[in-house]
Image (cartoon, rainbow, N blue to C red):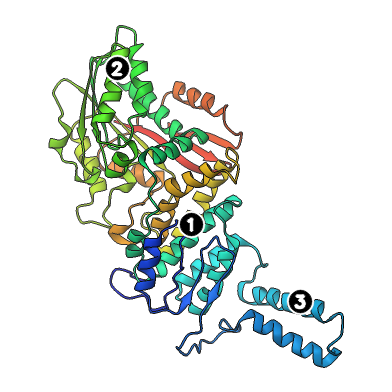
Amino acid sequence: MMDFDKQTCSIRQIIPQFYTLDSSEAANFAVQNSPSSISYSSVSGSSVSQQDSQSDNNHESPISHTEDPSDLKHKLREIEVAMLGPDSDIIDSFANACYISLEQEKWKQVMGTPQGDLKQVLIACARAVENNDVPMIEWLIPELQQMVSVSGEPIQRVGAYLLEGLIARLASSGSSIYKALKCKEPTSSDLLSYMHILYEVCPYFKFGYMSANGAIAEAVKDENMVHIVDFQISQGGQWVTLIQALAARPGGPPHVRITGIDDSVSAYARGGGLHIVGQRLSRLAESCNVPFEFTGAAISGCDVELEHLGVRPGEALVVNFAFQLHHMPDESVSTRNHRDRILRMVKSLSPAVVTLVEQESNSNTSPFFPRFLETLDYYGAIFESIDVSLPRENKERINLEQHCLAREIVNIVACEGRERVERHELFGKWRSRLTMAGFRPYPLSPVVNATIKKLLESYCEEYRLEERDGVLYLGWKSRALVISSAWI
């Protein structure tokens, strides 16, 4: 596998003029830093231009990748004119048929798959990138640019962002291109709107929050003072239903204190600092007659130390990891191994319960090519599930996929080392980490299971809920996508 942090990519740079994510900054960065004379249009566009290179392209290949298809078609016509005469009515149709036949034969020879199979072409391109197969890359990327679309079928849409990641990976340093590859940032209110739409059209976040809250409510049902540490507070929406549930608890609600850990992305989305979350939750708690405190910790999760948590004696401690722990670098990235360090630190505090909600995907330590296949399969299922709720031409759907999902895909495909922050693990690996840190499972109650089943009744029947050893798996068709578990 190519090491993009230590060596210059040996293949000739393949840089698009425009990116799917609408980044003129990325395009300028790419063009200014590439010696290549090859120029591709947007992956969702309909035309591809290729300038003549001054280098000698003497790559051995059964297919000529430098020959202009229009030249080939012109040569076919010259042969037909010589054979049939210049006025023959069948020349054009014969030329077209021969050209199409040659194109199809080329696909069979090189790809071993029918022309137009987008999934297989994406896989072939990723394999070519892995193998530094320059002629194949130069042929496949323009083909893919004609096949993908941010407003097409699910495979076309996820393919557009996978292709974006492949192109970024090829550009000398995938991490540098990824930094430049920033969408034209929407306003904070727009981004919050896109996140809210995603929250509503798919049950993944609701599933995670509801199942975690159910485990927390069960664990603190007899406690008078509860301290919740949320390692990714975001908008604080998870805690609305829990505060309401605690308010209705027989015997009265406990005193609730929340420490919200934050990052800059969440701050941008909500249009301000953590005080906004604190004010919102405080007003809710007051309306429910729940004694409440909020403390904000504007710090990256992997930088958290004991002093940031403000643990007090006599409180039942709850620690919540909802879609967050996979962002922390582990032993494959940092000698500090923040992923396991944080778990050991939390265990040392003897929490009443720890909740873990994560994507069920394997993209942490996998080499590039299997990671690409996993990303194609995982996000393909996500995009399919979105497809049943929002029309393909819906502008909001395009925006939420672009701003909430696309950059995850590009990061997984394009980046390595510390620059790759999307590092999902399967539940089996999380179980090993938690067990090594000293935790044991805290099975989710049947009430939680029943509540989630009720939630899914309002969504497409293709969603699947499964319980295995007290752990809940939510999936789309046969693909598990999100897991929820609790630990003590």
Q: Nearer the viewer, residue 165 or 394?
A: 394
Is 273 on the left-hand or right-hand side of 115?
A: left
Q: From the image, which quarter does the C terminus lie in?
A: top left
Q: Nearer the viewer, residue 90 or 162?
A: 90
CA gap between label 3 and label 1 equals 33 Å
Q: Is residue 245 visible?
A: yes
Query: Residue 280, percent across and down?
Result: 30, 24
Identify the secondary structure beneath mark 2. helix
Crowding at mark 1 (Cα within 10 Å: few <14, some 14-19, many 20+): many
Q: Earlier in the sequence, mark 3 or mark 1?
A: 3
Is 19 on the left-hand or right-hand side of 316?
A: right
Identify the secondary structure beneath mark 3. helix
Is 441 on the left-hand or right-hand side of 82?
A: left
Q: Which mark is residue 195?
A: none
Identify which amino acid the numbered label 1 is placed on: Tyr
Q: From the image, which quarter does the N terminus lie in?
A: bottom left
CA gap between label 2 and label 3 equals 72 Å
According to the image, label 1 marks what residue? 161
Query: Residue 69, percent across and down?
Result: 64, 79
According to the image, label 2 marks what residue? 285
Seen at 42% across and 60% down, the residue is: 413
Seen at 81% across and 93% down, the residue is: 82
Count every numbered label the image shows and give the total.
3
Query: Residue 105, percent across and down?
Result: 70, 76
Q: Earlier in the sequence, mark 2 or mark 1?
A: 1
Q: Residue furthest front?
A: 87
Q: Which mark is residue 96?
A: 3
